[in-house]
Amino acid sequence: MTSGVNPRSATRPGPLGEPKPDPLAPLQTALTPHAATLRTRRGQNVALAVDGSEAAFIVRSGVLTLNVTMPGTSRQVVAILFPGDVVRSSFVPREADGALTSASAGELWRLRWSVLAELATRDQAVASFLHEAVSRQMARRAIHIAAIGQFNCQQKVATFLIELALRTGTPSAGGGVAFDLPLSRTDVADYLGLNADTLSRTMSRLRSSGVLTHTDRNRAVVRDFRALATLSPATRSLIDIHSEKIG
Amino acid sequence: MTSGVNPRSATRPGPLGEPKPDPLAPLQTALTPHAATLRTRRGQNVALAVDGSEAAFIVRSGVLTLNVTMPGTSRQVVAILFPGDVVRSSFVPREADGALTSASAGELWRLRWSVLAELATRDQAVASFLHEAVSRQMARRAIHIAAIGQFNCQQKVATFLIELALRTGTPSAGGGVAFDLPLSRTDVADYLGLNADTLSRTMSRLRSSGVLTHTDRNRAVVRDFRALATLSPATRSLIDIHSEKIG
DNA sequence: CGGATTCTTGAGCATATTCAATTGTGGTGG
DNA sequence: CCACCACAATTGAATATGCTCAAGAATCCG
């Protein structure tokens, strides 16, 4: 059974092939004694609170989505979470039907927030990691908000593809970039504030214009990264954020 | 000169009139020795970095907007900042033309981030304040993202009005809620991912349907809060977030 | 009071949505 | 191995919602 689950997700090679060290390695000894390790499968939901009290989650591997559904509207994917990202239960407003959903097989650390906060007061590395993780996520959300609010359909899709290509892409034959699409069309549409039908149409247009190729339903190859890059107003910001994450 | 500047902004009475204690009072002695106090006027821009190094800003009074402009698109207001909110330079991605703009007269504390981070390691109250401030903001952004991504025009406008009414509203004669509109139509439109014309039209419709009244360009009265509340899918979440902020 | 903004409003238009039909995929069991 | 089913994705035609552009009204500020 090789389908669905991406065997590379645990080791996660860097963008365009550069190997990436695990940024959580230094924290492992500090955190693991207090953290529960959760293994998730595609589609699995993770409860946002541990018996009523606030929890913190640290993504070890895989991809998750943080979702919110306001009454009477369809779901909104508030953020796509990658390894190194941190979520607190309180990041999701109450009465908003929040959910943390695994998009691929992966691993999570879960701690009570009170415990993690306590650890942060003792261990400066933990405190600093938390601050930086949250700060990175704020910057990404700023891009996301700008994309949802100001971009047209094609720009939104291009932005999403570039985001993924930079995160999990590897060079493919012919100068392209290949990467997994851990999210379903519906997930992506809910992330971008688009209709799934419209999204599908837009991706088809990208495919027929030669920018994109699908080897598989869950895998894409960007044949012409340059062309794609010019389609998204956020390209420069995304590249910048991504290179920071490494250095 | 009473115009534009809201004389209440310094003391800031709570929602619907309950007096609200200054949540920053306990931190005053810890922070003020290291913070520069900036007084802003409506329309003023605040530089996001202090001579090249990362800065942190804590809103004392007034209202600010955090803006981002991707090349080739119009501006997006990423967040509206109220007293108690914290912003780091790194919350804005590079290459995104970030700006921190004052929407009303107000006061800011500015520190180098390195200094604030250092203070947080010594003083647990500071650390805890930072974590909670960021967490609150994450939750608000989740609502904002859901609003931009999923709501229609009327729902977006209703959501915005409720947000402001809960924040800065005071009961007015006849059971309504009166509050300042510190943002221009264009600002609000950029916040909601709408066209300014469309926004104006929508507010006119609310006005002619009796929900809303304008005494002044920068001041609004919600005559029927219930009716407005039913127009926004995020009402319950907003109320919840707002009541948390007090308790 | 006058000039410059900002806001409002209308008419026509464009983009994305809706709804429905069709095709494609992955998984299951014969 | 194939047939089948359920689900996801694609595609088309009609529609709706919000946008553009332009003109006029209101308000701000010197």
Image (cartoon, coloured by chain):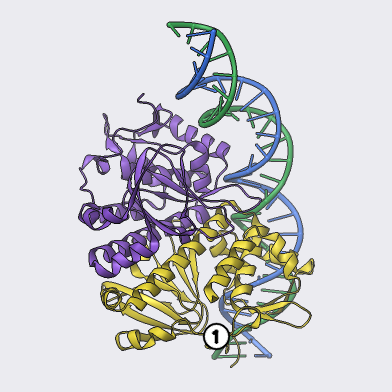
Chain colours: A purple, B yellow, C blue, D green
Quarter of the image for residue B146 reads bottom right
**Residue occupying the point 53% across, 60% down:** A93
Image location (x, y in percent) of residue B58:
40, 78
Q: Circle 1 — which element?
A: loop
Residue to which mark 1 is pinned: B9
**Residue occupying the point 32% across, 74% down:** B55
Quadrant where the C terminus of chain B is found in the figure: bottom right
Question: Disc 1 residue type?
Answer: Ser
Image location (x, y in percent) of residue B154:
68, 59
In the image, is B81 to the left or to the right of B16?
left
**Residue occupying the point 40% across, 74% down:** B129
Q: Is residue B75 visible?
A: no
Foreground: A232 or C2? A232
Image location (x, y in percent) of residue B191:
54, 64
Q: Is residue B145 visible?
A: yes
Image location (x, y in percent) of residue A200:
52, 35
Name of the residue lying farthest toward the bottom: B1
Q: In the figure, A14 relative to B79: above or below?
A: above
Chain of residue at mark 1:
B
Q: In the figure, A129 relative to B213: above or below?
A: above
In the image, is A239 to the left or to the right of B58?
left
